Image (cartoon, grey):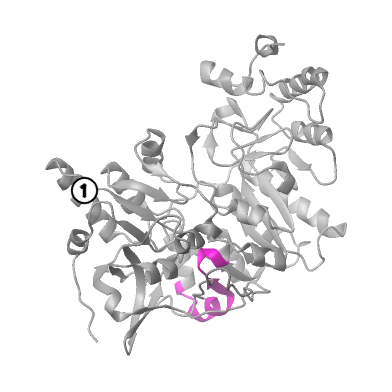
């Protein structure tokens, strides 16, 4: 059975204003690039001629510039869920121009199945290979999975396939595609180790649902990694030392834990430091996003196997995978996000969750999404999926940002994504605040101790002044956001006098 080859513009012409589109991928890895760009061009043309044109976008996580960026700039997105990091999209959301719904990534496919986000009209899926078996098409995905099986099954009007020549023949055998059942008929997700496979290596769909194949030869629009810095190196070393001491003291198993690591240069530094610490045994990875450091650790044998939802790597790192296909088919598996981030599995197999904070307050709450509590920086992603279900939950951050003008340790977070109930440790370049098994006031003292030295006296003064208000935790409600307000007014959090904020 022959599939129709069409252009991206022909695909975009079939999509109507107000329709709902599900995309493949997770981060820029595996996200479509041709049709979304054509939708941006169509939106610009429709708007120029005085006609409305916006679509609603469902994804596994963030995408690349060809979707989140270009479509935002073309005013082509009416609603979008869930996670994103694109700076253009962020600007439009913070200007109130796009309706954005954030949620835990493990729950995205479930929310779609339950109908809470509306129907799915179209799916646009990037593939590396297509096999036709009878009346079924077997779709081999590329570097990211996300919610692909769910949106393919739910798409009422059809599926467009972006056949990416950059990946042809190179991704077979890396995927494990499994979709969770509808409530109340769910069965256990039978994974007890990172390399367990429970599904098929492809997404299977009826051939009749495929409305066209669009050829593409564009690499993933991967974000470049910033070079390591003394701060990220120090954080990485502190995390590695903390984990080793926990293992030595019997607080984590001698066989060690499976590792989940977030996105960015700090996460790469942490994995690099762990790999260099010969006191830490070889370990497995069960995570959502696999980055460059993990690829090298797999090749060196320090990582025994890795499960993820996407390969958020540079093209150079991707070529290492393509150059060693047999090795990676037995040491790497890519899953849908509802499996890579599945709370049941995370709790079962013993995961150390390591994520990044925008800010942490002195009682151990973490803001990971919103600047000053109002401006979206990124979505929550899978950080809560892992943090709330892990054996050990760690957040790390540099002690300051903006050249020291902002402290990452504050009296009270302006927005809370992660409450102190689920956070075991916060780590900066100045050390580790182990928050387990202690009261709130000791938490405050330990967190102040890892703040930047410029801010420790300020935070200690706040804590001392707040003592007279009593309570299990000490706060001055009129002054809790004084550091943030000082930054808003003066461009630096280092206020000189708390008294102007203390109002009895």
Q: Which residue is mark 1?
A: 43
Q: Quadrant of the C terminus?
A: top right
Residue range in magenta is 322-339
Going 60% across and 47% down the picture, which residue do you hit?
266
Task: Tell whether position 331 is magenta.
Answer: yes
Q: Residues within 10 Å of mark 1 (few under 14, many from 20)?
A: many
* Rendered location of residue 404, percent (x, y): 60, 27
Give 85 or 415, whichever is nearer the viewer.
Answer: 415
Residue 93 image offset from top left, x and y in percent: 39, 38
Query: Is residue 431 shown left or right of residue 167?
Result: right
- Residue beneath the point at 48% across and 71% down: 321
Q: Looking at the magenta stretch, what is its main secondary structure?
A: helix
Question: At which x and y percent is residue 40?
Answer: 24, 50
From the viewer's perspective, is residue 178 above or below residue 16? below
Seen as rendered, the residue at the extreme right is: 249
User: Any magenta on residue 63?
Assistant: no
Q: Is residue 290 above or below residue 501?
A: below
Residue 87 location in percent, x, y? 40, 41
Q: Residue farthest to the bottom? A: 134
192 sits left or right of 335 in the view: right
Residue 180 position by quadrant: bottom right
Residue sticking out furthest to the front:
184
Is 241 displayed left or right of 299 in the figure? Answer: right
Please tell me which residue is depicted at 23% across the width and 59% down the height of the picture. Answer: 15
In percent of the image, x 60 and y 69: which residue is there? 306
Quarter of the picture holding the N terminus: bottom left
């Amino acid at each position: 059975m022959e599939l129709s080859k069409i252009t991206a513009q022909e695909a975009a012409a079939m999509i109507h204003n107000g329709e709902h589109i599900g995309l493949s991928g997770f981060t820029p890895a595996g996200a479509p690039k041709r049709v979304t760009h054509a939708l941006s061009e169509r939106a610009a043309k429709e708007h120029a001629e005085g006609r409305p044109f916006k679509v609603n976008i469902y994804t596994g996580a963030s995408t690349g510039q060809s979707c989140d960026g270009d479509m935002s700039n073309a005013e082509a997105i009416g609603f979008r869920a869930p996670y994103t990091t694109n700076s253009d999209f962020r600007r439009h959301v913070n200007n109130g121009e796009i309706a954005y719904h954030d949620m835990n990534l493990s729950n995205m496919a479930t929310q779609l199945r339950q109908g809470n986000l509306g129907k799915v009209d179209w799916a646009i899926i990037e593939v590396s290979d297509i096999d036709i078996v009878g009346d079924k098409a077997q779709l081999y995905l590329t570097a990211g999975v996300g919610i692909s099986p769910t949106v393919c099954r739910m798409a009422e009007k059809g599926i467009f396939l972006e056949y990416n020549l950059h990946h042809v023949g190179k991704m077979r055998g890396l995927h494990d595609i499994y979709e969770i059942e509808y409530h109340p008929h769910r069965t256990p997700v039978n994974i007890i180790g990172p390399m367990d496979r429970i599904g098929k290596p492809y997404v299977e769909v009826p051939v009749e649902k495929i409305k066209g194949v669009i050829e593409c030869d564009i690499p993933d629009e991967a974000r470049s990694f910033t070079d390591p810095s003394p701060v990220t190196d120090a954080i990485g070393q502190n995390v590695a030392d903390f984990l080793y001491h926990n293992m030595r003291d019997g607080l984590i198993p001698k066989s060690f834990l499976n590792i989940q690591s977030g996105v960015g240069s700090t996460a790469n530094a942490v994995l690099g430091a762990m790999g260099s610490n010969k006191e830490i045994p070889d370990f497995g990875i069960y995570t959502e996003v696999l980055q460059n450091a993990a690829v090298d650790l797999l090749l060196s044998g320090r990582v025994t196997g890795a499960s993820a939802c996407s390969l958020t790597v540079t093209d150079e790192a991707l070529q290492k995978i393509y150059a060693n296909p047999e090795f990676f088919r037995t040491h790497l598996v890519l899953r849908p996000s509802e499996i890579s981030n599945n709370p049941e599995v995370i709790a079962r197999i013993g995961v150390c969750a390591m994520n990044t904070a925008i800010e942490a307050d002195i009682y151990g709450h973490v803001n990971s999404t919103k600047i000053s509590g109002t401006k979206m920086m990124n979505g929550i992603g899978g950080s809560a999926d892992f943090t709330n279900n892990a054996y050990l939950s760690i957040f790390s951050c540099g002690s300051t940002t903006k050249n020291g003008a902002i402290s990452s340790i504050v009296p009270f977070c302006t927005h809370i994504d992660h409450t102190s109930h689920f956070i075991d440790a916060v780590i900066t370049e100045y050390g580790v605040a182990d928050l387990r098994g202690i009261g709130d006031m000791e938490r405050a003292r330990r967190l102040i101790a890892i703040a930047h030295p410029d801010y420790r006296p300020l935070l200690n003064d706040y804590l001392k002044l707040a003592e007279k208000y009593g309570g299990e935790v000490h706060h001055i409600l009129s002054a809790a956001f004084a550091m943030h307000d000082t930054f808003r007014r003066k461009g630096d959090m280092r206020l000189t006098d708390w008294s102007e904020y203390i109002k009895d």
